[in-house]
Image: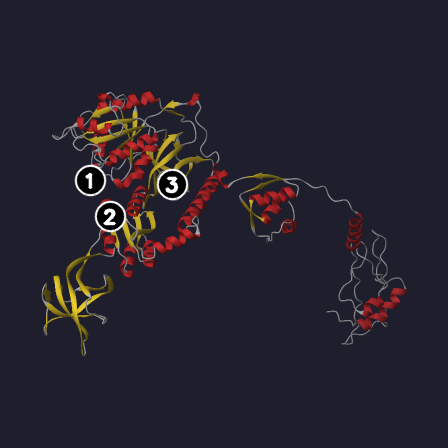
Amino acid sequence: PEPVVEPEAAAPAAKPAARAGEASTARPAAPGAAPRARTPVAEDEAPRGRKGGVPKAPPAPKATKGGEDRRRGRLTVTKALAGDEERTRSVASFKRRMQRLQGKGQSAEREKISREVIIPETITIQELANRMAERAVDVIRLLMKQGEMYKITDTIDADTAQLVAEEMGHTVKRVAESDVEEGLFAAADTDDRLESRPPVVTIMGHVDHGKTSLLDAIRKTNVVAGEAGGITQHIGAYQVASPSGGRISFIDTPGHAAFTAMRARGAKVTDIVVLVVAADDGVMPQTVEAISHAKAAGVPMIVAINKIDKPSANPQRVRTELLQHDVQVESMGGDTLEFEVSAVTRAGLDELLEGLALQAEILDLKANPERAAEGTVVEAKLDRGRGPVATVLVQRGTLKTGDIIVAGSEWGRVRALVSDVGEQVREAGPSVPVEVLGFNGTPEAGDRVAVVENEARAREVTEYRARQKRERASARASGSTRSLADMMRDLKEGAGRKEMPLVVKGDVQGSVEAIQGALEKIGNDEVAARVIHAGVGGITESDVTLAEASGAVVLGFNVRAHKEAREAAERVGVEVRYYNIIYDLVDDIRAVMSGMLPPQLREERLGEAEILEVFAVSKVGKVAGCRVQDGVVQRGAHVRLIRDKIVIHEGKLSQLKRFKDDAREVVAGQECGMAFENYQDMRKGDAIECYLVHEVRRTL
């Protein structure tokens, strides 16, 4: 290793070498010249190291790119005095100085670039500045001139953003969040590509009038056998072949009063309504409602008079009753087709199908199958094995496996299409009902379905719809649309209102919707059912946790609790009740809510007495000597003390004596002594009215 040379020792040796012109610290040669070789120092002039050895001369520093030696190590006073080089400004520093001098001399500003700025409904100041390619501080300064104080992260509305952009010399293009839905449902089909499509027929009518049995007879199936309570509680979609060779799509709707939304949904997507009326029962409330739905939808109606095989059947009575609701059948001079049918004997079914085919031919139903599919969610459910399943009625175009679809706030890629008979199909054309698998969540019944070009568009649309849905829900929960006076009034009126919290889980979306509607109707001003959560699918642990936190009861309609949820419910003491018939569920909740109502108090008058004298008795207080004038007076009954026709006290009779003995009751014409509970101000001449109070249980 080379010995360390002290700077002080090396300095005398370096000077003579520098004078000779051979030192390495001399000025650099011209660019491109080879560096000179360093002259070695004499041995007797070199300082000796600490160990006595003669150290070698320090190597010459390598020349830099421009021939200039790079300074190494710290700059000391000795090194600075020893070197002959002159310290000058660096090239970078010189360039910066020249740029500053040139910038000061330039008085002309850059040319302003006007941009088209896209402004949504709300935008942050930072984002607005980025879109205008302006500094955010300039935007804030402009807003401050207008008297507004903002931070860079604050959000401003579209009007303010437009004023700022126009003030800074830019043009504005206003867009709304709802623009993401533009083009989702394309324009109407053109005439050159239209093809005939099967008619969509909705069967409607009152409960237990034989709608599903009639459809079973047409389809040669037995759906009725699997229905709880003998009533339809789901909306079904089927396709059958007509005698003429074509196909007809049927939608079966429930007839129970709670399923109004389902019937309205069926009427919206249909081409023809078949009104089923039992010949032995006549026109009933849900029959009238079905007529209203058909008229509101503006679709033709066909009357099917069912159960003509029964001995008590009277089809003429049905025709007459329909006249009261502006439905005039053909046999009575009207334009509404009617058919007498029987689901049991299959009488009149072919005539009914022929009438439907004739009506469809008159309507001339056509659609374009060679386009992206559009349709409506008829029903939706959550299957534990298959995930979210939606029954979709395709209305235009052809739905194929692999399509990316949007329905409400849910989207997905079609994994499989299942027909009404349980077979997998590759595609579904217009008027074909299919079960669609592949949604990432359960859509709501009634949502419109559309095929989009890619996943990004699907996410954009569903995120916007989900945000709108959350805002509507929070607005309903907080009552933000109401005034302060409205909220104060509601608070005052609802101070004594009792609520029954419920968590509702059902098998399909329509049933949950019907249950919620039915529960809202059975409340009154004093007691009400509050559904804190409603969903589709089995009862989960989160449902039990929510019910425990809010003190709610969990209702399962055609669903069961998972094993973990059942164990959690038993552990925390949450009640889980299962139902498969909707009116059993409604009746039970009505009975519970009736028990929450305060009882009604009813008075029963017993008799009257007059105070003849007031006596002061030790350890008892004042005792009124009375004569019963009318009826009877009983011990423990309620009494009113009346003075000058004014009630001055209401209470209970604590003592009733006949002479010195306690008496249970004293009849009219007899004298007695009376003492009141916690009251002593009795005077001669006062009247006493005696009565009983009965509690009467109230019902909803």
> What percent of the width, then of the height, locates residue 253?
27, 35
Q: Is residue 121 left or right of residue 497?
A: right
Colour scheme of the rendered structure: secondary structure
Distance in Å between CA atoms under marks 1 and 2: 16 Å
On the image, numbered disc 1 is attached to which residue? 230
**How busy is the neighbourhood of tag 1: few (under 14 within 10 Å), some, or many (20 plus)?**
few
- Which mark is drawn over residue 585? 2
In the picture shown, does residue 527 fall above or below 81? above
Q: Is residue 412 left or right of residue 305?
A: right
Looking at the rendering, which quadrant does residue 108 occupy? top right
In the picture shown, does residue 228 fall above or below 681? above
Q: Is residue 102 left or right of residue 184?
A: right
The disc labelled 2 sits on which kind of residue?
A: Leu
Quadrant of image for the N terminus: bottom right
Which callout, 1 or 2, points at the residue further toward the start of the chain? 1
Which callout, 2 or 3, points at the residue further toward the start of the chain? 3
Residue 432 seen: no
> What percent of the width, then of the height, locates residue 195?
38, 23
- Pointer 2 with pointer 3, Cβ within 8 A: no
Q: Work out whether residue 255 or residue 193 is closer to the camera in this orientation and state it.
A: 255
The disc labelled 3 sits on which kind of residue?
A: Gly
On the image, numbered disc 3 is attached to which residue? 438
Residue in view at x 83 percent, y 71 percent: 46
> What percent of the width, then of the height, locates residue 461?
46, 40
Residue 74 seen: yes
Looking at the rendering, which quadrant does residue 159 occupy? top right
